[in-house]
Amino acid sequence: MTEVTKKESTGVALFSIWMAVSVIVVALDQLTKSAIIKWVMLYDKIPITDFINITHHRNTGAAFGFLAGASGWQKWFFIALGSAVSIFIVSWLWKIRRDGYATLSAGLALVMGGAIGNVADRILHGSVVDFIQVLIAGWPFPTFNLADSAITVGATLLIIDALFLSGRETSDAS
């Protein structure tokens, strides 16, 4: 096997791993949301600790309920936006597949998995199912889900990559 063939084979394997990460995020997100829909009535709260509740909320908007009160157009806007972001991320991951940018790739895979999880909710339920409620000093933080968590962790990795790693990692081509 030539060096170019080995590098391409490794690149395809890495790309496949990052796609699998996204699929796992979507699967876990949808599995937990299905359980919440089945077993927790809308707006019920199940205390887990003094600062975490499991609950069942629906969000027709974006983060923190942004645009939740709009007339319904936002559903299609967020489906289109999440789909476009996912397509962009797939192409970006394919482009960097041989370059060894693990932090960047992990961040992109998590953001994509979260975006697809929430797009799936909008298509299947017309809104996003949120169920994790964190209480800070007794006050509830906006309710979220595993997809939102994946997006947050992924975005954090992207920021870390941009601030500290991008352009500093070595690739096999160097």
Image (tube, rainbow, N blue to C red):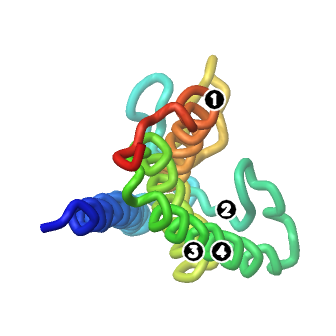
Percent of width and height locating residue 117: 49, 66
How many C-alpha atoms fall within 10 Å of the one at disc 3: few (<14), some, or many (≥20)? few
The residue that mark 1 highlights is: 163
Disc 1, SS: helix
Q: Is residue 38 left or right of residue 6?
A: right
Percent of width and height locating residue 143: 60, 46
How many C-alpha atoms fall within 10 Å of the one at disc 2: few (<14), some, or many (≥20)? many
The residue that mark 4 highlights is: 84
Give the CA distance from mark 4 to mark 2: 20 Å
The residue that mark 2 highlights is: 59
Mark closest to the chain's N terminus, 3 or 1: 3
Give the CA distance from mark 3 to mark 1: 25 Å
The residue that mark 3 highlights is: 87
Displayed quadrant of residue 139: top right
Q: Is residue 143 left or right of residue 67?
A: left
Q: Is residue 161 above or below residue 108?
A: above
What residue type is disc 3 on? Ile
> Decide: marks 3, 1 in contact (CB < 8 A)?
no
Pair 4/2: label in front: 4
Mark closest to the chain's N terminus, 3 or 2: 2
> Decide: marks 4, 3 in contact (CB < 8 A)?
yes
How many C-alpha atoms fall within 10 Å of the one at disc 4: few (<14), some, or many (≥20)? few
